[in-house]
Amino acid sequence: MSKDVTFTVQPGGALGGHLRVPGDKSISHRAIMLGALADGVTEVSGFLEGEDSLATLQAFRDMGVQIEGPENGRVVIHGVGLHGLQAPPGPLYLGNSGTSMRLLAGLLAGQRFDSVLTGDVSLSGRPMRRVTEPLAEMGAVIGTTEAGTAPLSICGDQPLHGIDYVMPVASAQVKSCLLLAGLYARGRTCVTEPAPTRDHTERMLAGFGYTVQREGAKVCVEGGGRLTASNVEVPADISSAAFFMVGASIAEGSDITLEHVGINPTRTGVIEILRQMGADLSLSNERTVGGEPVADIRVRAASLRGIHIPEEQVPLAIDEFPVLFVAAACAAGETVLTGARELRVKESDRIQVMADGLQILGIDARPTEDGMIIQGRGGEARPLGEGRVVSHGDHRIAMAFAMAALRASGPVVIENCANVDTSFPNFVTLAQQAGLRIRSETHE
Ligand code: S3P
């Protein structure tokens, strides 16, 4: 528990070669969940062996599901059917993983047994009323702290009924939570989203033979069906590939190809935003794998320019802003982000934490309530200074600042990097192979 990791990244260098980043985190979680609840045996390949998706896997083992692996990304799940889960022996500990907690809250609200969901300090500070309130409307009984945070105490044996819910925030976790509860509800459960969010749950439900209806921004499921086991091939995570997309864009002489990356249109905001900034990205070998589009992405260095990021792109790039802020610091002119208040309630307050770190590296980065204004220094060979920044235990902050070193004038030291293992366990090795001068030290 007391393990801490510091990254030290020497300045300069360029990124090159062919790289396959680990499996998509969102899809890995859902593969375990739906595989466990299906009738039959589901085989998953490309599974992300990161702490977050492993927390989901362990939760289902604790509820009596037999799961083989993971071994080289291969997991075999012996599904128990929608009504086959057993009461866990104690609280389900979900570490840093918001997706595990919010999706499981919906699924467990429909079980016959009680359950308790807990997490680490960061997860225990994140808002859960966004799921517990609509679940209560469906008939669920869930206790939170007074602040509306975990631990979540979920009472079993509560009959659920379908609702027609209009989400106040664009959140795939809330949408997915309610759809999973909807599998156990009487009647139809519908969720309307204010803007498109990742649709992996809907795609995978359909892949497991469950009817999902979509009418514009509204998505609905009817309770009382069943899931049929289906094999899942998890593509590489575009959110992990994003660090290398930005790194290669900002470091002169870079030319890197990221293989087999998921390019689901609800996830490709980072590509769109980088292209608007002048990045040189080309997609090839586009194909569909297990209901999800994938491609190889080649990225070559380019001169970036600052932009006003279109608000409709925000939910489509929601996890990529830490590294996009680094791109903005290396772009010519001002970049303005608005409409991204959600960044304040991620694994850390990503607006504040990134602004603090960029300022330490000499960048004029002004946090606003719902975004940031960054004066890019793209005209300079080394737009960023050197220094020591803190990631606040947020994996994506740590990896974003690692890439910043490519254009820094001296070493960048990043504290609190242990949680990189939640989403990208082999980051340091892959980054070294690609050309980043990164070293990782573990302290007890
Ligand atoms: C996720 C949805 C997003 C994202 C998170 C994964 C998912 O969260 O930030 O990393 O797998 O559904 P929100 O639903 O809170 O936007």
Image (cartoon, rainbow, N blue to C red):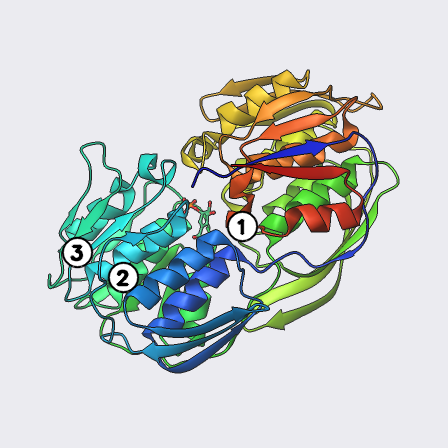
Instruction: Tell which circle, 1 or 3, labels the residue nearer the N-terminal end.
Output: 3
The residue carrying pointer 2 sits among few (fewer than 14), some (14 to 19) or many (20 or more) residues within 10 Å by Cα, namely many
Give the number of the disc on residue 40: none
SS for dot 3: loop
2 or 3: mark nearer the eye: 2
Horizontal and vertical percent position of residue 424? 58, 50
Q: Is residue 425 left or right of residue 26?
A: right
Tell which of 190 and 66 is nearer to you: 66
Tell which of 33 and 318 is nearer to you: 33
Q: What residue is shown with label 1? A: 423
Q: Are marks 2 and 1 in contact (CB under 8 Å)?
A: no
Instruction: Tell which circle, 2 or 1, labels the residue nearer the N-terminal end.
Output: 2
Q: Which residue: 15% across, 55% down?
A: 140
Q: What residue is shown with label 2? A: 107
- Quarter holding the N terminus is top left
1 or 3: mark nearer the eye: 1
Looking at the picture, which amino acid does disc 1 mark? Ser
Is 216 situated above or below 81?
Answer: above
SS for dot 2: helix
Q: What residue is shown with label 3? A: 138
Horizontal and vertical percent position of residue 335? 65, 25
Q: Which residue: 54% across, 48% down?
A: 421
> CA gap, disc 2 to disc 3?
12 Å
Q: Is residue 43 left or right of residue 108?
A: right
Tell which of 322 and 114 is nearer to you: 114
SS for dot 1: loop
Looking at the picture, which amino acid does disc 2 mark? Leu
Residue sitting farthest toward the bottom: 40
Q: Quadrant of residue 355?
A: top right
Q: Is residue 154 visible?
A: yes
Horizontal and vertical percent position of residue 306? 70, 27
